Image: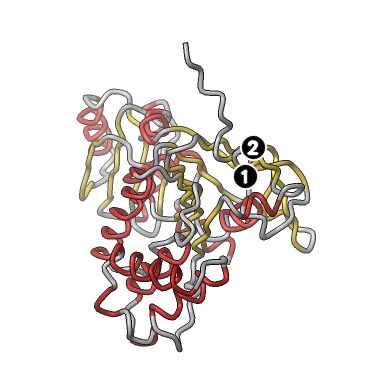
Amino acid sequence: MNINTSPPAIEAVGLVKTFGGQRAVDGVSLTVPTGSVYGVLGPNGAGKTTTVRMLATLLRPDGGKARIFGRDVVRESAAVRSLVGVTGQYASVDEDLTATENLVIFSRLLGLSRRDATRRAAELLEEFALTEAASKPLKEFSGGMRRRLDLAASLIARPPLLFLDEPTTGLDPRTRAQMWDTIRQLVAEGSTVLLTTQYLDEADQLADRIAVIDRGRVIADGTADELKASVGVSALQLTLADRDQIEQARTVISSALGVEATATPESGRITAPLSDPSIAADLLLQLRDRSIAVDEITVSRPSLDEVFLTITGHDTAESERSVA
Protein backbone atom coordinates (compact mmCIF):
# COMPACT_ATOMS: atom_id res chain seq x y z
CA MET A 1 0.00 0.00 0.00
CA ASN A 2 1.48 3.34 -1.11
CA ILE A 3 0.89 6.28 1.18
CA ASN A 4 1.66 9.80 -0.06
CA THR A 5 3.75 11.38 2.69
CA SER A 6 4.84 14.45 0.74
CA PRO A 7 4.17 17.75 2.55
CA PRO A 8 1.44 20.12 1.38
CA ALA A 9 2.43 22.94 -0.96
CA ILE A 10 1.59 25.48 1.75
CA GLU A 11 1.13 24.99 5.46
CA ALA A 12 0.63 28.18 7.46
CA VAL A 13 -0.37 28.41 11.12
CA GLY A 14 -1.32 31.63 12.91
CA LEU A 15 0.39 34.11 10.60
CA VAL A 16 0.44 37.66 11.97
CA LYS A 17 1.66 40.90 10.42
CA THR A 18 1.35 44.30 12.07
CA PHE A 19 1.78 47.73 10.52
CA GLY A 20 1.80 50.75 12.82
CA GLY A 21 0.01 48.93 15.59
CA GLN A 22 -2.71 47.59 13.29
CA ARG A 23 -2.88 43.87 12.50
CA ALA A 24 -3.18 43.56 8.73
CA VAL A 25 -3.04 39.77 9.13
CA ASP A 26 -4.39 38.42 12.40
CA GLY A 27 -3.70 34.70 12.82
CA VAL A 28 -4.21 33.32 9.30
CA SER A 29 -3.90 29.53 8.93
CA LEU A 30 -3.97 27.79 5.54
CA THR A 31 -3.21 24.32 4.19
CA VAL A 32 -2.90 24.04 0.40
CA PRO A 33 -2.61 20.54 -1.14
CA THR A 34 -0.11 20.04 -3.92
CA GLY A 35 -1.60 20.20 -7.42
CA SER A 36 -4.63 22.29 -6.51
CA VAL A 37 -5.97 25.81 -6.93
CA TYR A 38 -6.55 27.40 -3.54
CA GLY A 39 -8.60 30.58 -3.57
CA VAL A 40 -8.18 33.33 -0.98
CA LEU A 41 -11.31 35.43 -1.25
CA GLY A 42 -11.84 38.83 0.26
CA PRO A 43 -12.22 42.54 -0.48
CA ASN A 44 -9.42 45.07 -0.84
CA GLY A 45 -7.73 45.57 2.52
CA ALA A 46 -8.71 42.15 3.88
CA GLY A 47 -5.08 41.00 4.25
CA LYS A 48 -4.76 38.81 1.15
CA THR A 49 -1.70 40.48 -0.39
CA THR A 50 0.10 40.72 2.95
CA THR A 51 -0.47 37.00 3.49
CA VAL A 52 0.95 36.20 0.05
CA ARG A 53 4.00 38.40 0.66
CA MET A 54 4.77 36.55 3.89
CA LEU A 55 4.37 33.14 2.24
CA ALA A 56 6.61 34.23 -0.65
CA THR A 57 9.33 35.47 1.79
CA LEU A 58 8.82 39.10 0.75
CA LEU A 59 7.69 40.04 4.27
CA ARG A 60 8.82 38.54 7.56
CA PRO A 61 5.89 37.38 9.73
CA ASP A 62 5.53 38.99 13.15
CA GLY A 63 3.97 35.79 14.43
CA GLY A 64 3.05 32.28 13.39
CA LYS A 65 4.82 29.85 11.08
CA ALA A 66 4.63 28.84 7.44
CA ARG A 67 6.20 26.14 5.29
CA ILE A 68 6.36 25.80 1.51
CA PHE A 69 6.76 22.15 0.48
CA GLY A 70 8.11 21.56 3.99
CA ARG A 71 10.57 24.49 3.91
CA ASP A 72 10.30 27.18 6.58
CA VAL A 73 9.68 30.60 5.00
CA VAL A 74 11.91 32.36 7.54
CA ARG A 75 14.76 29.91 8.23
CA GLU A 76 14.90 28.50 4.69
CA SER A 77 13.88 31.54 2.68
CA ALA A 78 16.41 31.00 -0.12
CA ALA A 79 15.13 27.48 -0.71
CA VAL A 80 11.53 28.71 -0.65
CA ARG A 81 12.26 31.36 -3.29
CA SER A 82 13.48 28.67 -5.66
CA LEU A 83 10.11 26.92 -5.36
CA VAL A 84 7.74 29.82 -5.99
CA GLY A 85 6.72 32.32 -8.62
CA VAL A 86 4.80 35.49 -7.81
CA THR A 87 2.52 37.58 -10.00
CA GLY A 88 1.42 40.69 -8.13
CA GLN A 89 -1.53 43.00 -8.63
CA TYR A 90 0.53 45.31 -10.80
CA ALA A 91 2.80 44.34 -13.68
CA SER A 92 6.48 44.17 -12.72
CA VAL A 93 7.67 44.45 -16.32
CA ASP A 94 9.49 47.46 -17.84
CA GLU A 95 7.31 49.55 -20.15
CA ASP A 96 10.24 50.92 -22.12
CA LEU A 97 11.41 47.43 -23.18
CA THR A 98 9.85 44.96 -25.58
CA ALA A 99 8.17 41.77 -24.46
CA THR A 100 11.17 39.72 -25.56
CA GLU A 101 13.65 42.03 -23.82
CA ASN A 102 11.70 41.84 -20.56
CA LEU A 103 11.62 38.05 -20.57
CA VAL A 104 15.28 37.74 -21.55
CA ILE A 105 16.34 40.04 -18.69
CA PHE A 106 14.28 38.08 -16.15
CA SER A 107 15.71 34.83 -17.50
CA ARG A 108 19.27 36.10 -17.23
CA LEU A 109 18.63 37.23 -13.64
CA LEU A 110 17.51 33.68 -12.91
CA GLY A 111 20.84 32.33 -14.18
CA LEU A 112 20.00 31.23 -17.73
CA SER A 113 22.61 31.67 -20.45
CA ARG A 114 21.90 34.20 -23.18
CA ARG A 115 20.98 31.42 -25.61
CA ASP A 116 18.69 29.68 -23.12
CA ALA A 117 17.14 32.99 -22.08
CA THR A 118 16.28 33.82 -25.70
CA ARG A 119 14.84 30.35 -26.26
CA ARG A 120 12.77 30.47 -23.06
CA ALA A 121 11.43 33.93 -23.92
CA ALA A 122 10.26 32.69 -27.33
CA GLU A 123 8.59 29.65 -25.76
CA LEU A 124 6.67 31.76 -23.25
CA LEU A 125 5.61 34.35 -25.80
CA GLU A 126 4.15 31.59 -27.93
CA GLU A 127 2.49 29.91 -24.96
CA PHE A 128 0.78 33.15 -23.95
CA ALA A 129 -0.18 34.19 -27.50
CA LEU A 130 2.19 37.17 -27.52
CA THR A 131 4.52 36.19 -30.36
CA GLU A 132 3.15 38.81 -32.76
CA ALA A 133 3.79 41.52 -30.16
CA ALA A 134 7.23 40.25 -29.17
CA SER A 135 9.10 43.27 -30.56
CA LYS A 136 6.64 45.93 -29.40
CA PRO A 137 7.40 48.14 -26.39
CA LEU A 138 5.10 47.40 -23.49
CA LYS A 139 3.68 50.92 -23.54
CA GLU A 140 1.72 49.76 -26.61
CA PHE A 141 0.29 46.70 -24.81
CA SER A 142 -3.27 46.42 -23.54
CA GLY A 143 -3.88 45.67 -19.87
CA GLY A 144 -4.62 42.02 -20.65
CA MET A 145 -1.41 41.62 -22.65
CA ARG A 146 0.63 43.08 -19.79
CA ARG A 147 -0.95 40.70 -17.30
CA ARG A 148 -0.21 37.73 -19.55
CA LEU A 149 3.40 38.85 -19.92
CA ASP A 150 3.72 39.32 -16.16
CA LEU A 151 2.43 35.78 -15.63
CA ALA A 152 4.82 34.49 -18.28
CA ALA A 153 7.74 36.12 -16.43
CA SER A 154 6.78 34.29 -13.23
CA LEU A 155 6.92 30.98 -15.12
CA ILE A 156 10.43 31.27 -16.55
CA ALA A 157 11.81 28.74 -14.08
CA ARG A 158 8.60 26.65 -14.00
CA PRO A 159 8.21 26.88 -10.20
CA PRO A 160 5.98 24.21 -8.61
CA LEU A 161 4.02 26.86 -6.67
CA LEU A 162 2.54 30.06 -8.11
CA PHE A 163 1.15 32.95 -6.10
CA LEU A 164 -1.30 34.88 -8.28
CA ASP A 165 -2.33 38.01 -6.42
CA GLU A 166 -5.53 39.30 -8.04
CA PRO A 167 -4.25 38.46 -11.54
CA THR A 168 -7.39 39.61 -13.36
CA THR A 169 -7.96 42.95 -11.62
CA GLY A 170 -8.94 45.56 -14.19
CA LEU A 171 -9.26 43.14 -17.10
CA ASP A 172 -12.24 42.99 -19.43
CA PRO A 173 -14.45 39.84 -19.24
CA ARG A 174 -12.93 38.24 -22.34
CA THR A 175 -9.35 38.65 -21.11
CA ARG A 176 -10.36 37.42 -17.65
CA ALA A 177 -11.74 34.24 -19.23
CA GLN A 178 -8.46 33.77 -21.13
CA MET A 179 -6.51 34.10 -17.87
CA TRP A 180 -8.79 31.54 -16.23
CA ASP A 181 -8.02 29.08 -19.03
CA THR A 182 -4.29 29.72 -18.55
CA ILE A 183 -4.53 29.04 -14.81
CA ARG A 184 -6.43 25.81 -15.40
CA GLN A 185 -3.77 24.70 -17.89
CA LEU A 186 -0.95 25.43 -15.42
CA VAL A 187 -2.57 23.21 -12.80
CA ALA A 188 -3.23 20.48 -15.37
CA GLU A 189 0.51 20.52 -16.07
CA GLY A 190 1.35 19.98 -12.39
CA SER A 191 1.56 23.44 -10.81
CA THR A 192 -0.03 24.42 -7.52
CA VAL A 193 -1.72 27.85 -7.47
CA LEU A 194 -2.68 30.11 -4.61
CA LEU A 195 -5.04 32.68 -6.11
CA THR A 196 -6.17 35.79 -4.27
CA THR A 197 -9.23 37.53 -5.62
CA GLN A 198 -12.04 39.88 -4.69
CA TYR A 199 -14.16 38.44 -7.51
CA LEU A 200 -16.60 35.90 -6.12
CA ASP A 201 -17.23 34.28 -9.50
CA GLU A 202 -13.50 33.84 -10.06
CA ALA A 203 -13.06 31.86 -6.85
CA ASP A 204 -16.15 29.82 -7.72
CA GLN A 205 -14.85 29.02 -11.22
CA LEU A 206 -11.23 28.18 -10.39
CA ALA A 207 -10.64 27.17 -6.80
CA ASP A 208 -10.70 23.60 -5.48
CA ARG A 209 -10.87 25.07 -1.99
CA ILE A 210 -11.51 28.60 -0.73
CA ALA A 211 -10.55 30.58 2.35
CA VAL A 212 -12.68 33.66 3.02
CA ILE A 213 -10.61 36.42 4.64
CA ASP A 214 -12.10 39.53 6.19
CA ARG A 215 -10.23 42.11 8.26
CA GLY A 216 -7.11 39.98 8.48
CA ARG A 217 -8.75 36.75 9.61
CA VAL A 218 -9.89 33.53 7.95
CA ILE A 219 -13.59 33.43 8.70
CA ALA A 220 -14.50 30.40 6.57
CA ASP A 221 -12.73 27.63 4.69
CA GLY A 222 -13.96 24.85 2.44
CA THR A 223 -14.91 23.89 -1.08
CA ALA A 224 -17.31 26.20 -2.92
CA ASP A 225 -20.12 23.68 -2.39
CA GLU A 226 -19.35 23.37 1.32
CA LEU A 227 -19.38 27.13 1.78
CA LYS A 228 -22.65 27.46 -0.11
CA ALA A 229 -24.24 24.65 1.91
CA SER A 230 -23.22 26.41 5.13
CA VAL A 231 -25.69 29.23 4.48
CA GLY A 232 -28.67 27.13 3.43
CA VAL A 233 -29.91 24.83 0.71
CA SER A 234 -31.30 27.78 -1.25
CA ALA A 235 -31.03 31.55 -1.16
CA LEU A 236 -33.85 34.07 -1.19
CA GLN A 237 -33.26 37.46 -2.80
CA LEU A 238 -36.03 39.98 -2.68
CA THR A 239 -36.16 43.58 -3.97
CA LEU A 240 -38.75 46.00 -2.62
CA ALA A 241 -40.70 48.61 -4.56
CA ASP A 242 -40.30 51.04 -1.63
CA ARG A 243 -36.84 51.08 -0.04
CA ASP A 244 -38.22 52.87 3.03
CA GLN A 245 -39.96 49.61 3.97
CA ILE A 246 -36.77 47.53 3.97
CA GLU A 247 -36.41 47.23 7.75
CA GLN A 248 -40.07 46.32 8.16
CA ALA A 249 -39.74 43.69 5.43
CA ARG A 250 -36.50 42.33 6.89
CA THR A 251 -38.21 41.81 10.25
CA VAL A 252 -41.10 39.95 8.60
CA ILE A 253 -38.74 37.74 6.60
CA SER A 254 -36.49 36.95 9.56
CA SER A 255 -39.50 35.99 11.66
CA ALA A 256 -41.10 33.88 8.93
CA LEU A 257 -37.94 31.99 8.04
CA GLY A 258 -36.43 31.74 11.52
CA VAL A 259 -33.11 33.09 10.24
CA GLU A 260 -31.35 36.42 10.10
CA ALA A 261 -32.14 38.22 6.85
CA THR A 262 -29.58 40.72 5.54
CA ALA A 263 -30.71 44.03 4.10
CA THR A 264 -28.89 46.34 1.66
CA PRO A 265 -30.78 49.64 1.94
CA GLU A 266 -29.08 51.27 -1.08
CA SER A 267 -30.51 48.70 -3.47
CA GLY A 268 -33.66 47.80 -1.53
CA ARG A 269 -32.52 44.17 -1.54
CA ILE A 270 -32.95 41.57 1.18
CA THR A 271 -31.06 38.27 1.23
CA ALA A 272 -31.67 35.24 3.44
CA PRO A 273 -30.86 31.51 3.49
CA LEU A 274 -33.87 29.37 2.69
CA SER A 275 -34.10 25.73 3.75
CA ASP A 276 -37.46 25.08 2.07
CA PRO A 277 -38.15 26.98 -1.20
CA SER A 278 -41.91 26.32 -0.87
CA ILE A 279 -42.03 28.80 2.03
CA ALA A 280 -41.42 31.67 -0.42
CA ALA A 281 -45.09 31.73 -1.51
CA ASP A 282 -46.31 32.02 2.10
CA LEU A 283 -43.77 34.76 2.71
CA LEU A 284 -45.11 36.82 -0.21
CA LEU A 285 -48.62 36.59 1.27
CA GLN A 286 -47.36 37.86 4.63
CA LEU A 287 -45.65 40.80 2.96
CA ARG A 288 -48.79 41.61 0.95
CA ASP A 289 -50.90 41.54 4.13
CA ARG A 290 -48.59 44.27 5.51
CA SER A 291 -48.83 46.31 2.28
CA ILE A 292 -45.16 45.72 1.44
CA ALA A 293 -44.83 45.66 -2.34
CA VAL A 294 -42.20 43.42 -3.92
CA ASP A 295 -40.58 44.30 -7.25
CA GLU A 296 -38.63 41.09 -7.69
CA ILE A 297 -38.10 37.80 -5.89
CA THR A 298 -35.72 34.96 -6.76
CA VAL A 299 -34.97 31.66 -5.09
CA SER A 300 -31.68 30.08 -6.10
CA ARG A 301 -28.83 27.95 -4.93
CA PRO A 302 -26.54 30.16 -2.83
CA SER A 303 -23.64 31.84 -4.59
CA LEU A 304 -20.37 32.83 -2.96
CA ASP A 305 -21.80 36.34 -2.81
CA GLU A 306 -24.50 35.13 -0.40
CA VAL A 307 -21.86 33.18 1.53
CA PHE A 308 -19.74 36.29 2.04
CA LEU A 309 -22.77 38.42 2.88
CA THR A 310 -24.10 35.91 5.41
CA ILE A 311 -20.76 35.16 7.07
CA THR A 312 -19.52 38.74 7.37
CA GLY A 313 -22.78 40.68 7.58
CA HIS A 314 -21.74 42.92 4.67
CA ASP A 315 -20.97 42.60 0.99
CA THR A 316 -17.51 43.04 -0.55
CA ALA A 317 -18.19 46.60 -1.67
CA GLU A 318 -19.19 47.64 1.86
CA SER A 319 -16.06 45.99 3.26
CA GLU A 320 -13.91 47.87 0.74
CA ARG A 321 -15.42 51.16 1.87
CA SER A 322 -14.74 50.27 5.50
CA VAL A 323 -11.00 49.85 4.87
CA ALA A 324 -10.59 52.74 2.43
Q: Residues within 10 Å of mark 2 (few under 14, many from 20)?
A: some
Lower position in the chain sequence, tag 2 or tag 1: 2
Closer to us: mark 2 or mark 1?
2
Q: Nearer the viewer, residue 58 or 314?
A: 58
Q: Which mark is residue 217?
A: 1
Residue 191, given in percent of the width and then of the height, sits at 43, 45
Q: Which mark is residue 160?
A: none
* In the image: residue 47, left or right of residue 145: right
The residue depicted at 23 percent of the width and 35 percent of the height is 284
Residue 297, given in percent of the width and then of the height, sits at 22, 43
Does 58 appear above or below 247? below
Assign a secondary structure to mark 1.
Answer: strand
Amino acid beneath label 1? Arg
Residue 306, given in percent of the width and then of the height, sits at 38, 42
Q: Which residue is mark 2?
A: 70
* In the image: residue 258, left or right of residue 290: right
Amino acid beneath label 2? Gly
Q: Nearer the viewer, residue 45 or 141?
A: 141
Q: Residues within 10 Å of mark 1 (few under 14, many from 20)?
A: many
How many numbered discs, if any? 2
The residue depicted at 28 percent of the width and 49 percent of the height is 239
